[in-house]
Amino acid sequence: MNRRITRVVMPLACLVALWGAVPVLAEDAALVRSLNGQFKDVTQKNKTSPGILAAYIAMTPPPFELGDGFNQGTIWPKMEGWAKVAEWAKANEAAGVALDASQFGLIFGLGYGKGAVDAAAAKSGLAIEFGEGVELAKVRYGYFKAIRALGAYATAEMYRRGEAGEFDQAFKVGISYARLLRQVCEQSMLEEKLFALESLAETLSIHRDFMWTYLKLLPVDTMKNAALKEYPFLRPSDNEKMKRLQMPEGDRLVAEAVLREALAPTKGSSIDKDHFAEVVGGQPSPEGVLQRFNTQEMWRRVADVHGSLEASQEKLLNVYDDWWRRWRVRPYTALHQMPTEFSRANPIKYAAVLAMLRDMERAFSWKNVLIAEINGTVMAAGLCGYYNEFRQAWPKDRERAYATFFQKRYDFDPYDKAYGRLQYRALGAERQAVQTPLGRVWATGCMVWAMGTDNEDGSGESHSDDAAIGDLLLWPPVRALAREEGLLK
């Protein structure tokens, strides 16, 4: 049996046996069991999610409501209300203990469904909950608020420790939280993957803000330890190319469940158009996809020409198999230049399939951003160690910092088609203007940047956080520079 059949078809065959001709709620139960099947051989003690959720429940409320105005990216010692934030962080040091205990856990392992968490977590709304019946694909990720709150705590505690000159403790709590996010990156649903990838990328940028804020005070040994032993191993099996990061596939099981409910023949051998419209029209569709089918009447018309259940299942398998192959192979190969199965799908015949899926392109994009963020943070930490070791001078050539201050293999740019190094420039007494979404900032000392999605070196003259426009400036940190220019409070 070939790889594809072993990997994809067999789980679906098991689902068919579980579902059979049963009511929708029983299908929901089968879906949850299928999603949780990945955890069947993992004991509770090897999962970090129970301890993390318990730590969140035990935390006191933050001094400000979490949201756009208060989150891990807005916290720093000169913010308005810093004294209250620092006091909150100090009062919740138990959260730091929980993060420290979780960082080397085998797996985050938060199960799916209301029954996957204990009573306290369920009462706090931390479960991953699915909709019922025609709203099956409406998923609520309640635990996100716990991860965000712990991120705010970790940032506040880092800066609180930094203000006290306790840099080892500061990096300990910050890296513990980064390792927790790396575990969350392995959850099965695409929305979870994107949440964790983006959160971890932001967390690492915050760590570089911290390095810039306390640059001249950072102990050399602390920075060498961070660059050589801590950041490179957010997960023990990781490397500079994040080859062990898994593609999310839980959405495939949800889509399969919806397709079975929507396309199962209910009137002889034909599809019940009203039921099809109710089921597919009741699911949350990706923004911008099939907007012309936003009414039940239009979905009834689509039912007349839509592919059969078997054809739709096959198309779903082909889409995921194509994504899986692209996820595993090196970027910039011939396969990556070809249209995806998702993009080639007939938008009418497979309208229900497309309505159930979000294009995986964002996950591919943020995977590259995270690779650049990790490698840039390793390099920044090493450069900070070099800077203080050699009387506050940056290396004229990065090779001078290799081995002693950071590993050469982490000097890797995921946007370089030749699989080459990150860009580096020692500025000396000069400074360079950089255009950013926050406004123009000025880089000094030295610069490290990745090329961005255009795969061209823009000399670090422009920056975007997702590398979509211009380069991705990794050092000096953009947020810290923007604060110096008064562009951020």
Image (cartoon, helix red, strand yellow):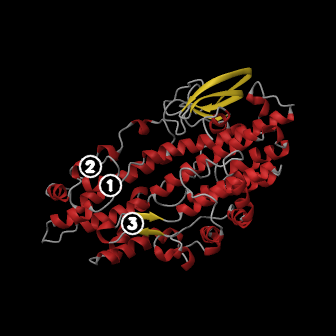
State the quadrant of the C terminus: top right
Residue 285: assigned label: 1
Task: Determine the secondary structure under disc 3.
Answer: helix
Residue 485 location, x and y as percent? 65, 31
Residue 271 in sight: no
Residue 191 location, x and y as percent? 46, 56
Residue 150 location, x and y as percent? 63, 60
State the quadrant of the N terminus: bottom left
Q: Is residue 229 above or below residue 113?
A: above
Q: Quadrant of residue 25?
A: bottom left
Q: Is residue 314 above or below residue 403?
A: below
Relative depth, front residue between 51 and 331 = 51
Residue 214 location, x and y as percent? 78, 41
Task: Determine the secondary structure under disc 2.
Answer: loop
Residue 332 in sight: yes
| Alpha carbon separation for disc pair 2 and 1 | 8 Å
| Alpha carbon separation for disc pair 2 and 3 | 30 Å
Are the residues at dot 2 and dot 1 in contact (C-beta closer than 8 Å)? Answer: yes
Precedes in sequence: disc 3 or disc 1: 3
Say what amino acid the circle numbered 2 marks: Leu
